[in-house]
Amino acid sequence: LCSCPVTAADPGMTEMASCWRSRVKLPQASQLVKNSEVHCSLGPSHLLSLSPSPLVLPPSSLIERGFLASPQPGTAAVLGISRGPSPVVLGSQDALPVAAAFTEYIDAYFRKGDFESCLTRITGEMAMSFPAGIVRIFGSIPCPPVLSFRLLNTAHVDQFIPNAALLYSDLSQSDPSTRDFWLNMQALSSHLQRQAEDSPSASYYNVTLLKYQASNAGPRAAPLKLAASWKRTIVSTEVSVKYKYNAGATATPVPLTNLQFLLPVEEPVANMELQPMASWNSEEKRLLWQLPDACDEKAPGGSGMLTASWEPLCGPTTPSPVAAQFTSEGSTLSGIGMELVGSGYRMSLVKKRFATGKYLVGS
């Protein structure tokens, strides 16, 4: 490895720290069931197969939509305010600051009206963020120190897909609970330089390094447990959905935010009654419940039941899956973590977040 003296200034990382204030923009109700292409094939039959599928995450991920995004104008970052590129300069032995972000999606299908009858799949990606000053350093020295890191708690991850252009890994590692990676520094320098040319005023640049998948985690991995029941006759329909927060899904309990449920009602109906109240989209024929954050099973919002009843105008109702959606920050569902290996760099921030993919409950 090359030993290249570098200095990092903390104010340059304040733009990345401000991502604590960022939020994921939820899709409209009409998009909830469709979701992104990574989850489009995950219906009940797909989940029942339990066989790993090719891992393809959408190009516009949570990370790219604001996971390490710059603060809004006038918003103070956690560590202060930075108004320009990172002032990272050469001159001492200080390590260069980098940040990392883990974003995960959980697909789940609950069946038989039972909280514990559930199939799940977790997909995720890891990105690193580099302050603009590092781009100048990489361009000014022939061989920057190699950036290496170790993923922790990987025993439940059954598929890794590194960014082949940037990342190396030793596939002969015998310990299933860790996985070591290191970057191709020449390729990384060129990649960051291209980003800098495209966005010369950016304070830092995000690079997706790998994707991963953990399948068949079962109900223990579901942060919100669901159960649904349908009662149908020729003249009446009643559907109820029970939900319960599962603190054991993450190492540290975190709130589920932006919680909502969507129920398609494709048939013509009359005399609809809802508890609690929901919004009805007559054009799209969908009910949408928007609920408070869920953070404790015993606290308000931690568990509850939704009910809807109506009179079908065309005979008995055909049951359809109810979809749930939520986001959360501060933890991952896979339990995966990371640490830097070697010298030359220091971890300034590790951000973790998860959200729903297709999260359905059948009758």
Image: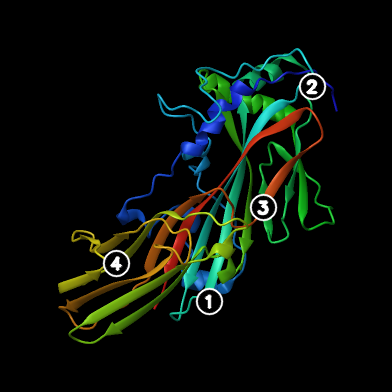
Q: Which mark is residue 264?
A: 4
Residue 116 in the image: above or below residue 340: below
- Residue of label 2: 143
Instruction: Check the picture and name the quadrant holding the C terminus.
Output: bottom left
Q: Is residue 115 left or right of residue 28?
A: right
Check disc 2: other Cα within 10 Å, few if <14, some if 14-19, many if 20+.
some
Residue type pointed to by label 3: Ile
- Residue of label 1: 116
Quick one: SS at disc 3?
A: loop
Residue 163's x, y, as percent? 66, 42
Q: How far apart are marks 1 and 2 (CA)?
A: 53 Å
Q: Distance between the residues labelled 4 and 2?
A: 57 Å
Q: How far apart are marks 2 and 3 (CA)?
A: 31 Å
| Residue 175 can be seen, yes or no | yes
Quick one: SS at disc 1?
A: loop
Quick one: SS at disc 2?
A: loop
Which residue is painted at 52% across and 59% down in the image? 106
| Quarter of the image where one finds residue 11 | top right
Tag 3 or tag 4, which sits nearer the N-term? 4
Check disc 4: other Cα within 10 Å, few if <14, some if 14-19, many if 20+.
some
Residue 46 in the image: above or below residue 230: above
Tag 1 or tag 4, which sits nearer the N-term? 1
| Quarter of the image where one finds residue 187 | top right
Residue 139's x, y, as percent? 69, 17
Quick one: SS at disc 4?
A: strand
Q: Which of marks 4 and 1 is in front?
A: 1
Tag 3 or tag 2, which sits nearer the N-term? 2
Residue type pointed to by label 4: Pro
Q: In this view, does 315 lie to the left or right of 105?
A: left
Q: Which of marks 1 and 2 is in front?
A: 1
Q: Is residue 360 left or right of residue 55?
A: left
